[in-house]
Image: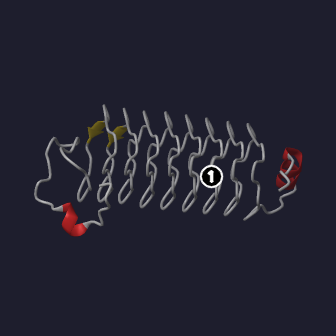
Amino acid sequence: MAIPPKEEVLKDIKAGKSLVEADLSWVDLSGEDLRHLDLRGVTFTGANLSDCDLREANLAGAFLPEADLQRSNLSKCNLRNAFFQKCNLQKAILDEADISEASFPLADLTNAKLMNIIACYASFIDATINSVDFTGADLSHTVFRGASLRNAIFHHVNLSYSDLRKAKLIDASFDSVQAEGVLFYGKRPWDGQSDKSTNWKDILPFSEAD
């Protein structure tokens, strides 16, 4: 597959051509100003989007496996239903973004900022999310199963009905957390209590590995 030249893509952007559902796999757009662009459904497999300014861009349904987004600014982006498998989002800024129903399996979000995000039904299975600030975030129904959340900040967040089974929460900070119906093994770090009243085997599909 031919990799689209950076100059060609930037020329199309400047000309106002639609990039909706375009295939921009492996393209190098590092450091570019991509604010407010309509990038719905775009395929960015392996693309270099590091240090990009993507504020308020529409990436709903975009496909970004193994893309490099480290240090990029995605604040106030529409990232609903986007797919970020093994994506590098270290030190990225996603403040006030809508990542509802987006998937981040095995992604690396170390030191990213996710303050005031909307992440309802998002999935971070086995992702690395160390030292991330979730202050003010709506994380209801979000799946963090198996994720590493060391030193993460959960202040004034809604974690209701989220899945934190097997998540690594070493030195994570919790304050003013809504946590109704959270799935969690052992002592809950937000209130120091254990939920001994629920028999998970009666209500959850367990596998041999559980």
Closer to us: 171 or 146: 146
Q: Quadrant of residue 93?
A: top right
Residue 108 in picture, x, y percent from top left: 52, 40
Q: Quadrant of residue 208?
A: bottom left
Residue 79 in picture, x, y percent from top left: 57, 56
Q: Secondary structure at mark 1?
A: loop
Q: Residues within 10 Å of mark 1 (few under 14, many from 20)?
A: many
Closer to us: 77 or 86: 86
Residue 161 in picture, x, y percent from top left: 29, 60
Residue topped by disc 1: 65
- Quadrant of the frame with the C terminus: bottom left
Residue 111 in picture, x, y percent from top left: 49, 33
Left or right: where does residue 7 sit relative to residue 93? right
Left or right: where does residue 108 sit relative to residue 11? left
**Vertical arrangement, residue 85 with respect to residue 93, above or below:** below
- Quadrant of the frame with the N terminus: bottom right
Image point 63% across, 41% down: which residue? 69
**Vertical arrangement, residue 24 with respect to residue 152, above or below:** below
Left or right: where does residue 110 sit relative to residue 6? left
Image point 57% across, 38% down: which residue? 92
Q: Amino acid at mark 1?
A: Pro
